[in-house]
Structures are given as structure tokens and as C-alpha cells.
Image (tube, helix red, strand yellow):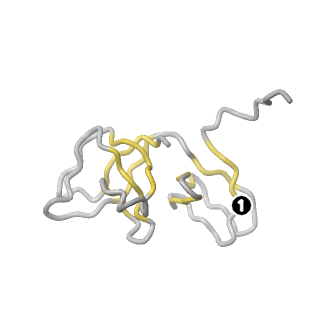
């Protein structure tokens, strides 16, 4: 059987069991996507799996992130981290700009 092209893959279809609000991060196995629009429960919507997004990060001493660092999504704390915590946090991509200890967000290029 031949392989069939479906689409460019910048976003994927997703049908949530509960409402997903624009900006929510959704983890499916090792795949992490970001909702660009609200998605009602039980209705098909789309998650971005490529692009550059500002993700929340912890603040305070020792939380700075260098440009080009791999970052992971901590679904419990709902922040981007440089620690995968032995696979509990899923890779979201690499930072495209440094974020200091006092910065509440880090700019990340999604790549999985």
C-alpha cells in the first residue's frame, strides 16, 4: 500500500473530553500540542505542534533558561522546565531566547 499525504502537519486534530481553552497545553503520550482556539468538549479542534510559543516557567533563583536549551512540559506544575524528571515531563522543544530567573515565560520553538 502506498503512503498517502494528509496535510503539512503543523496542527493535528484533537477531540477533548473536557473543554480546552486557547493556550492550553495538551499532552498525548510523547506528543505535546497547544490549542490556538477554544475546543468544546466532544468537538474536534486543532492543536498546534509546530511554531513558537511563550510557555510559562517558574521564577526565582536558579530558574533561568539559556537560549537553545531543550525544555519539557511539566503537566502537574503547568510550566516549562529544563528537566525531564526521568521522562515524566515531555519534550516541547528548544528555547529561541534566554529567559532570566525573574521571567515568567520562556519562548520555545515546538519540536518533537
> Which residue occupies 26% across, 39% down?
67
Q: Could you say which quadrant of the image residue 68 lies in?
A: top left
Residue sitting at the far right: 1
In the image, 71 versus 84, the foreground residue is 84
In the image, 65 versus 91, the foreground residue is 91
In the image, 10 versus 38, the foreground residue is 10
Give coordinates of residue 85: x percent, y percent.
35, 62
Residue sitting at the far top: 2
- Is disc 1 placed on a helix, strand or loop? loop
Quarter of the figure that contains the N terminus: top right
Q: With respect to residue 70, does 27 lie above or below?
A: below
* Res 33 seen here: no
* Res 46 seen here: yes
Q: Could you say which quadrant of the image residue 37 lies in?
A: bottom right
Q: How many tags in the picture?
A: 1
Position of 59 compared to 105: left or right?
Answer: left
Q: With respect to residue 108, does 79 lie above or below?
A: below
Q: Which residue is mark 1?
A: 15
Give coordinates of residue 103: x percent, y percent.
23, 56
Residue sitting at the far left: 61
User: 10 Å neighbourhood of mark 1: few (<14), some, or many (≥20)?
Assistant: some
> Which residue occupies 20% across, 53% down?
64
Give coordinates of residue 87: x percent, y percent.
42, 59
Give coordinates of residue 108: x percent, y percent.
38, 45
Q: With respect to residue 36, does 58 lie above or below?
A: below
Amino acid at each position: 500500500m502506498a503512503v498517502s499525504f494528509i496535510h503539512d502537519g503543523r496542527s493535528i486534530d484533537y477531540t477533548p473530553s473536557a473543554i480546552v481553552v486557547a493556550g492550553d497545553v495538551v499532552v498525548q503520550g510523547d506528543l505535546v500540542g497547544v490549542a490556538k482556539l477554544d475546543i468544546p468538549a466532544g468537538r474536534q479542534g486543532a492543536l498546534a505542534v509546530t511554531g513558537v510559543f511563550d510557555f510559562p516557567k517558574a521564577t526565582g533563583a536558579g530558574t533561568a533558561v539559556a537560549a537553545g536549551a531543550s525544555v519539557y512540559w511539566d503537566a502537574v506544575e503547568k510550566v516549562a522546565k529544563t528537566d525531564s524528571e526521568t521522562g515524566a515531563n515531555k519534550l516541547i522543544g528548544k528555547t529561541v531566547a534566554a529567559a532570566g530567573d525573574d521571567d515568567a515565560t520562556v519562548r520555545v520553538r515546538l519540536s518533537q
